[in-house]
Amino acid sequence: MSGRLTVRQHIFRSLGVVFVGLGFIGVFLPLMPTTPFLLLALACFARSSPAIHDWLINHRILGPYIVDWERDRSIPMAAKITSIVMMSASFAWLVLGTSAPAIALWMTGAVLICVALYIVTRPTTRR
């Protein structure tokens, strides 16, 4: 095959870039997941660019999350704590700093509790 990318490879590479961006945003936003987007990016790059795929797995910040999740579905303790703290702070701001309707508060609270329970019940990465 020549050095030219197929349409399929362009699509997968573009999706991979979008998913990495969403995963990176998820590092900072509590309701935005990081690992699922990085895993989707990894799958896209596996089909479009082995070099980017390898770069992502070996990335010093993002790579360990991917490897931990793929290996044993675990989350590092620091990530668990950060996630729970950020979700709690976001919810506190929503309750105290906005005039959101009660239904929005209840629904947001329910979602955050479910996400927090999911995070807490995942195995913790041992490093």
Image: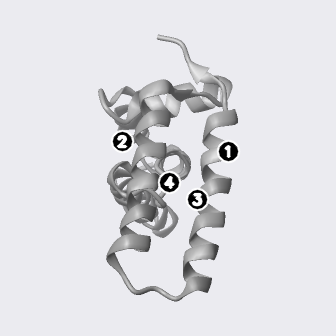
x then y, percent, for residue 66: 50, 34
Disc with the residue nearer the chain's start (4 vs 1): 4
Mark in the foreground, 4 or 1: 1
Q: CA distance from mark 1 to mark 3?
A: 10 Å
Q: CA distance from mark 2 to mark 3?
A: 33 Å
Q: CA distance from mark 4 to mark 1?
A: 12 Å
Residue 95, which numbered label? none
Mark 1 lies on a secondary structure that is helix
Q: Residue furthest front?
A: 96
Mark 4: amino acid: Pro
Mark 2 lies on a secondary structure that is helix
Disc with the residue nearer the chain's start (4 vs 3): 4
Mark 4 lies on a secondary structure that is loop
Mark 1: amino acid: Tyr
Residue at left offset 45%, top offset 44%: 83
Mark in the foreground, 2 or 1: 1
> What residue is pinned by disc 2?
52
Mark 3: amino acid: Leu
Disc with the residue nearer the chain's start (2 vs 1): 2
> What residue is pinned by disc 1?
118
Disc with the residue nearer the chain's start (1 vs 3): 3
Above or below, 10 relative to 79: below
Mark 2: amino acid: Ile
x then y, percent, for residue 121: 69, 34
Mark 3 lies on a secondary structure that is helix
> What residue is pinned by disc 3?
112
> What residue is pinned by disc 4?
33
Residue at left offset 63%, top offset 55%: 113
x then y, percent, for residue 41: 48, 51
Residue at left offset 36%, top offset 26%: 58
Q: Give the number of marks.
A: 4
Above or below, 69 relative to 15: above
